[in-house]
Image: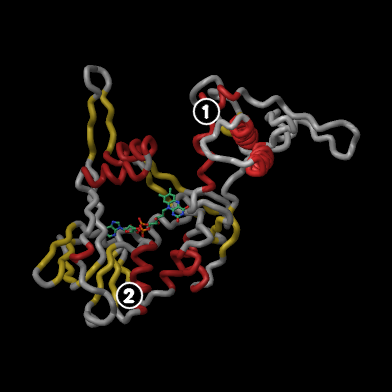
Amino acid sequence: MARFVEVLAGDLVILSLLSRLSLRVPNTSCYTVQMTRRDLLLLAANAYGVNFAYGMLEDMGLLIKPEPTDLDSLSGQTVKKATVLILGAGIAGMCAAYELEQLGYSCVLLEARHRTGGRCYSIRRGNTVEESGQKQVCEFEHGAFFNPGPTRVPYWHITVDYCKKFRVALAPWVNVNEGAYVFQTAGKMKGQKIRLRDAIADTTGYMAELVAKSVKADQVDVALTDADKTQMLTYISRFGFLDRDGKYRGKGRRSFKTYAGAGPADSEFDAPYDIKDLFEAGMGNYFHFIDANDQQSTMLEIVGGVDNLAKAFQRNIASPIHFGCEVSDIKNLRFGRRCRL
Ligand SMILES: Cc1cc2nc3c(=O)[nH]c(=O)nc-3n(C[C@H](O)[C@H](O)[C@H](O)COP(=O)(O)OP(=O)(O)OC[C@H]3O[C@@H](n4cnc5c(N)ncnc54)[C@H](O)[C@@H]3O)c2cc1C
């Protein structure tokens, strides 16, 4: 039996139930791919990124963006008596409740699940996780946890302000491990176990060597004085760990093959990878990730699990949260909106 709740203003989160899809591969009689819309969206997100998947959600009519002009003003001045209905007690919903409470509003949160936090969640011993039709019960040691969704917080992010406000402890998060191995799926390096540090050292080294050659040969389309060139070559050769003759030979930034320590022998290094193989494999295409403005050092994590932030929000809001309330429909009325549960 459907229940109705009438409200004057409210946030809008609509996720429709996904029904099963059956896709047939054209021109074949023997291959039928059974997949849910969720599988399809996951495939799209993996292949083309989350933005593409969001676009698909919109095209499929599953993601409805509310028009900002359609919302009542929530400045705290005009509709003080209104109760704000918030759909979803994820971080956004609880943050909205917290801020609206500061402005003097009362809120009611309707949450489909039986917990707060939404994607801001940590899996701990005893938790049951159901994804893509599979049910797993977590058997971690007591105290161990896994954040399946958000983990990293940029140091400048508003999340840090809320952590400070609610006394949620933060710790530095190591966002890159150059000692880790990577492998590529194309080119001559396909399937090879390659240390990330060596891939970065060789790619930047070769690039620096090429730029240094161009600067020396006046092949750059910027007018440079001799002093400019000297400065630029100093920078490039330090950036790429080039030899005195401007060549990259795979030392300085690469990992040691043998480390000489204080002894008389020199440390040894493996020969650098071939420049063409590196670029054919697209090895350098992801190095920029940790330089993006939302991934730069120092990244932070929430100590003890990201769900500690969700719990802190929950503790700091007075508004009631109704669990197990999945909203299936929202109707615009002449005065306010109506939600169907
Ligand atoms: C794998 C992954 C990694 C990520 N990593 C990071 C990261 O490192 N750093 C970072 O800052 N961000 C990260 N994000 C993004 C971050 O998780 C989200 O931006 C954030 O959690 C979104 O919060 P939200 O409250 O808007 O949505 P959600 O967390 O999705 O919350 C929505 C809530 O609404 C409820 N709900 C849904 N439909 C209904 C309905 N019909 N009726 C009632 N309730 C409903 C849900 O149960 C849920 O509780 C990551 C996301 C993912 C998936």
Element under disc 1: loop
Task: Using residue 216 as the reference point, say whether residue 45 is left or right of it.
Answer: left
Q: Is residue 171 visible?
A: yes
Q: Where is 40 relative to 68, above or below?
A: above
Q: Position of residue 168 (x, y in %)?
A: 53, 68
Q: Position of residue 111 (x, y in %)?
A: 31, 62
Using the rendered image of the protein, determine whether residue 126 is visible from the camera's viewpoint.
no
Q: Residue furthest right?
A: 264
Instruction: Name the quadrant of the N terminus.
Output: bottom left
Across and down, in percent, residue 35 comes to 28, 34
Would you say the residues marked 2 and 1 are in contact, meaning their CB atoms lie under 8 Å apart? no
The residue type indicated by label 2 comes to: Leu
Residue closest to the eye, 328 or 12 = 12
Q: Quadrant of residue 257?
A: top right
Q: How is the image coloured?
A: secondary structure
In the depicted view, which residue is nearer to us: 161 or 130?
161
Q: Tell me the number on the disc at residue 100.
A: 2
Find numbered disc 2 in the image and state the secondary structure of the residue it sits on: helix
> Based on the displayed image, in which of its 4 quarters is residue 209 positioned?
top right
For mark 1, does the 10 Å Cα neighbourhood hold few (<14), some (14 to 19), or many (20 or more) residues? Answer: some
User: In the orientation shown, which residue stands out farthest toward the left?
Assistant: 334
Q: Is residue 143 left or right of residue 246?
A: left
The residue depicted at 61 percent of the width and 29 percent of the height is 217
Sequence-wise, which precedes: disc 2 or disc 1?
2
Q: Residue 237 lies in what quarter of the image?
A: top right
Quarter of the C terminus within the rendering: bottom left
Front-most of 146 and 238?
238
Residue under the image location 28 percent in, 77 percent down = 75
Disc number placed over residue 184 in the picture, else none: 1
On screen, residue 71 above or below 245? below
Amino acid marked by disc 1? Gln
Q: Quadrant location of ligand 1?
A: bottom left
